[in-house]
Image (cartoon, grey):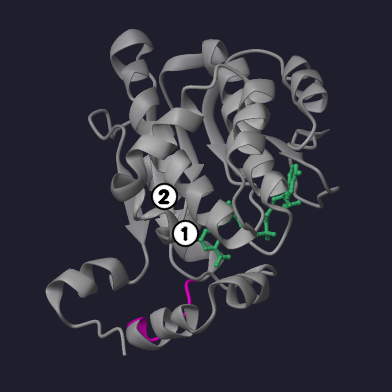
């Protein structure tokens, strides 16, 4: 197992590679340090909507996309990619035009140019970033037919991690409503189990799908057992 992160990690891994997803040259350098074939790529790193909107998009979308594109040829047939999105990206269909325009940019630098022409605030940039991640996986779903590699997204609701406070600051009372209506926040283990499941080579036909891991909150809005006030 190889871990990549901006910050040093105490994870027990074979190799740790330092990368800053806001800096494309470090992504390029990090990809070159990975040897051999890859079974599973998990894109988990992300920053909340309390930081600079361009940083949000650099880390959550442009860096994720660049790293995945650099590694895709190395993922073996039967392998998989899972990106961590969020239920904050659940409105991707309502914003599909805007999302597709950002995703049509050919590379990191062009993505930055597009963002500078289409400024948004930090809160919107987080939601937009996760909408982009969900749609990106739907686009990358062609890799199953072309090279035998599945790509899916996991969209958690609130998870008890160090950045939950930032999410509360940017999302506001809606976050507490999700917690109240579902009974608790997710643990990191709740989400990791689903990522592990999606990564199983036995799931040969699950592809280009977003799996919401939110205690049923989003479905409860449709089912009528979740109340917004
Ligand atoms: N915590 C939640 O409530 C919640 C809800 C939905 C989705 N998510 C998503 O889950 C993912 C993991 O978040 P988390 O809650 O575990 O937060 P976290 O802060 O614990 O983990 C985020 C990781 O991303 C890394 N990172 C940040 N900026 C980076 C950069 N520039 N380059 C490389 N790595 C960088 C951090 O060092 C950290 O290890 C994120 O994509 C987040 O958007 C979290």
Which residue is rendered at x = 37% and y = 17% of the image? 143
Indicate the quadrant containing the N terminus: top left, top right, bottom left or bottom right.
top right
Q: Which of the two residues, 157 or 194, is positioned nearer the viewer here?
A: 157
Task: For marks 1 and 2, give the one nearer the viewer.
Answer: 2
Evaluate if marks 1 and 2 touch, with contact meaning CB atoms under 8 Å apart. Answer: yes
Please indicate whether residue 195 sits to the left or right of residue 139 in the image. right
Please indicate whether residue 184 sits to the left or right of residue 202 in the image. right
Q: Position of residue 188 (x, y in %)?
A: 55, 64
Q: Is residue 200 visible?
A: no
Q: Earlier in the sequence, mark 1 or mark 2?
A: 2
Q: Position of residue 105 (x, y in %)?
A: 54, 22
Magenta-drawn stretch contains 37: no
Q: Residue furthest front?
A: 117
Name the residue that disc number 2 marks: 154
- Please give the range of residues in magenta: 182-186
Q: Secondary structure at mark 2?
A: strand
Q: Disc 1 versus disc 2: distance between alpha carbons?
A: 8 Å
Q: Position of residue 193 (x, y in %)?
A: 44, 55
Quarter of image, res 144 = top left
Mark 1: few, some, or many residues within 10 Å (few <14, many ≥20)? many
Q: Which of the two residues, 152 or 194, is positioned nearer the viewer here?
A: 152
Q: Is mark 1 within 8 Å of ligand 1?
A: yes
On residue 178, the disc is: none
Q: Is residue 226 visible?
A: yes
Magenta-colored segment: predominant secondary structure = loop
Which residue is rendered at x = 26% and y = 35% of the image? 206
Residue 90, relative to residue 132: is it above or below? Answer: below
Which residue is rendered at x = 53% and y = 57% of the image? 124
Q: Which of the two residues, 5 or 37, is positioned nearer the viewer here?
A: 5
Which residue is rendered at x = 49% and y = 84% of the image? 173
Residue 186, relative to residue 54: is it above or below? Answer: below
On residue 191, the disc is: 1
């Amino acid at each position: 197992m190889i871990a990549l992160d901006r910050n040093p990690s105490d994870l027990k891994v074979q190799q740790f590679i330092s990368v800053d997803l806001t800096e494309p040259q470090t992504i390029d350098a990090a990809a070159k340090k990975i040897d051999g074939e890859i079974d599973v790529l998990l894109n988990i790193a992300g920053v909340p909507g309390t930081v600079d909107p361009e940083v949000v998009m650099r880390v959550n979308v442009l860096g994720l996309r660049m790293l995945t594109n650099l590694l895709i040829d190395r993922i073996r047939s039967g392998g998989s990619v899972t990106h961590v999105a969020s239920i904050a990206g659940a409105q991707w269909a309502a914003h599909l035009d805007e999302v597709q325009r950002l995703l049509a940019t050919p590379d990191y630098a062009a993505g930055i140019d597009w963002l500078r022409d289409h400024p948004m605030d930090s809160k919107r940039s987080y939601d937009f970033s996760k909408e982009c991640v969900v749609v990106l996986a739907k686009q990358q779903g062609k890799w199953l037919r072309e090279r035998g590699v599945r790509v899916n997204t996991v969209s958690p609701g609130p998870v008890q991690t160090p950045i939950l406070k930032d999410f509360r600051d940017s999302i506001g009372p809606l976050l507490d409503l999700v917690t109240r209506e579902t009974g608790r926040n997710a643990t990191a283990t709740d989400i990791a189990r689903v990522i592990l499941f999606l990564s199983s080579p036995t799931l040969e036909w699950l592809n280009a799908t977003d799996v919401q891991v939110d205690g049923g909150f989003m479905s409860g809005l449709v089912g009528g057992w979740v109340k917004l006030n």
